[in-house]
Image (cartoon, rainbow, N blue to C red):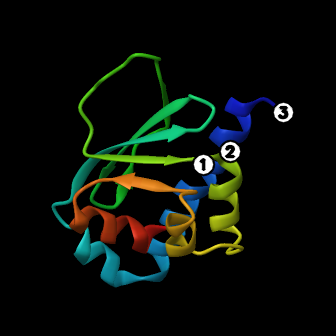
Amino acid sequence: MSDETEELEVIEELVDKFKDKLNEDDSLEKQLKGYRRDIRIEMDSGNRYGITLNETEISDIKREQDGSDDEVDIILYSDADTLRNLLNKEIGVMQAYAKNKIKIDAPLTDMLKIKKLL
């Protein structure tokens, strides 16, 4: 399986998990009212993916071209294994962050919202 295929699969799983959380937790809809962020996920392979979170909707995942410097609100740096471990609850967000397995470049308020979604 190629890096890109594996990365897309794990990002799709993250999006599905977010959608599941929305269905389970009505308070998230209130917390995300008026919230719109462009998010870039930069993998250790060098591949970059973009999604837009618009309140409770997430756009399709798009592969960004190398060298693209479009303005984004949040950048998440990681690798497919770490993201999969987060999904499987084999590692917590704070543990991954402390071990530099995940890095989030965003204002604190956005970091707290993203933590709730992972």
Kind of residue at disc 2? Glu
**Circles 2 and 1 in contact, beta carbons < 8 Å:** yes
Q: Does 14 sit above or below residue 115? A: above
| Callout 1–callout 3 Cβ contact below 8 Å | no
Q: Nearer the viewer, mark 2 or mark 3?
A: 3
Number of the label disc, if any, that sits on residue 1: 3
Sequence-first tag of 1 and 3: 3
Dot 3 amino acid type: Met
Farthest left residue in view: 34
In the foreground, 2 or 19: 2
Q: Which label lies toward us, 1 or 3?
A: 3
Image position, residue 76 (x, y; %): 43, 49
Tell me the distance, in whole angstroms, between the alpha carbons under discs 2 and 3.
11 Å
Considering the numbered disc 2 on the image, is that residue within a helix, a strand or a loop? helix
Residue at the image position 53 percent from the left and 58 percent from the top: 100
Q: Give the left or right position of residue 72, taking residue 83 as reference.
A: left
Q: Secondary structure at mark 1?
A: helix
Is 111 above or below relative to 48? Answer: below
Residue 82 is tagged as none
- Tell me the quadrant of the picture where the N terminus can be found: top right
The answer to whether mark 2 and mark 3 are in CB contact below 8 A is no
Residue 93 shown left or right of residue 82 in the figure: left
Residue 14 in the image: x percent, y percent? 56, 57
Q: Which mark is residue 12?
A: 1
Residue for point 24% across, 75% down = 31
Residue type marked 1: Glu
> How far is disc 1 from disc 3 in space, using C-alphas?
16 Å
Q: Residues within 10 Å of mark 3 (few under 14, many from 20)?
A: few
Q: Residue 102 appears at what percent x and percent y?
A: 52, 56
Looking at the rendered structure, which numbered label has been put on residue 9?
A: 2
